Amino acid sequence: MLRMSQGAYLAVVGAALLVACDATVQTAVPPRAPSDETTELAPPPPPPPSPARMEVALKVPPLEEADTVVLDPRATRLHPRPISLLTVEARQLQSLLTATDASARDRPLLLRRIAEDNVELASAAESEVRAAAESGDDATVRAKRGVAISARRAAIDAYRALVVQTWNVPYAKMDEAEWYLALECARAGDVEWAQYAYRLVREHPTSPFTPRAYLLFGALFAAQATTDPSKHAAAAQAFSRAAQSSNAELAQRAHVRLERESPAAGDPASEVPTTTPPVATDRGCTTDLQCKGARICQGGKCVDPSE
């Protein structure tokens, strides 16, 4: 029997819920009676998002610009090279990977190079999307957005191949690769970001990238706390761990986020979480990530969102 990862299962269930719930919120609009008036009425406001759509959206942490600056300070993301150059380079590297033996010792380095080039390509395309949007060039917005999405997916594929490798080739910067895999998944809206972030926390508790994972989890819990106040405590705990980073900018940002959560969560310092991922259980929970399968945490219990 084919087994699906928790992230893939969440995505499938979430998509099914979206279809079902969106169908129920559609309401028929009665035809407007004929009138001699020529004044056009403003279109009605869009319906509020369905509960299922909100739940799926909150599986991925919404990041503020100040969060992104400390989570990903890579110069190639901030100042990418031209799209034309990056496109050719990425294509050449992919061809080289195809010709490289799976057990070659330089294969991990090649995968990392492919991932980094595609992250840079996605950043370059997103910059052009913003510029085109400001000038009202919708055609360019659509085209470059497609480039960005495709490049980010290629970066995720390369990072995943590096992290979840099936060959015995050592790679010295595995903690860094796991972090950027988690981050790119979060940017792409892929709920599997959480399992890679937890893998980083579990396998590399002293890595300088681990506090970034805690900041990412804190951002998720803080967003969930807008509808479930019990999540303030989890957010405060995660930000508290991130604030222990030796990176001054990251620690300062974590302190800023922690100050927002502390009044609602109490004192998080006495409840600092361990580096061990929470055990999946249906008897009690504080976050969705502690629940099995597609179940979510509500009122301290794991429940099926489709029921």
Image: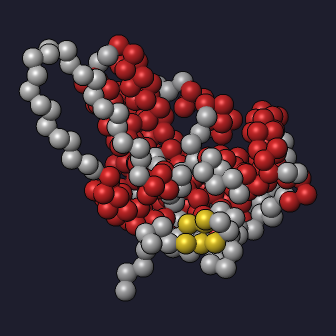
Q: Position of residue 166 (x, y in %)?
A: 50, 71
Quarter holding residue 105: bottom right
> Is residue 296 visible in this depiction of the protein?
yes
Q: Position of residue 250 (x, y in %)?
A: 76, 37
Image label count: 0
Q: Nearer the viewer, residue 221 or 120?
A: 221
Q: Nearer the viewer, residue 128 or 34?
A: 34
Query: Residue extending furthest bottom?
Result: 1
Q: For the point 67% across and 47% down, which residue is it?
A: 222
Instruction: Report the quarter where the N terminus lies.
Output: bottom left
Relative to 111, 26 lies left or right: left
Quarter holding residue 260: top right
> Is residue 238 visible in this depiction of the protein?
no
Q: Is residue 29 above or below residue 249?
A: below
Relative to 13, 229 lies left or right: right
Q: How is the image coloured?
A: secondary structure
Relative to 130, 240 lies left or right: right
Q: Is residue 129 above or below residue 50?
A: above
Q: Nearer the viewer, residue 229 or 9?
A: 229
Q: Position of residue 298 (x, y in %)?
A: 61, 65
Instruction: Report the quarter where the C terminus lies.
Output: bottom left
Q: For the point 85% across and 46% down, which residue is it?
A: 244
Q: For the point 29% across and 18% down, which residue is it?
A: 137
Q: For the point 32% across and 26% down, which residue is it?
A: 141
Query: Residue extending furthest right?
Result: 270
Q: Position of residue 179 (x, y in %)?
A: 62, 51
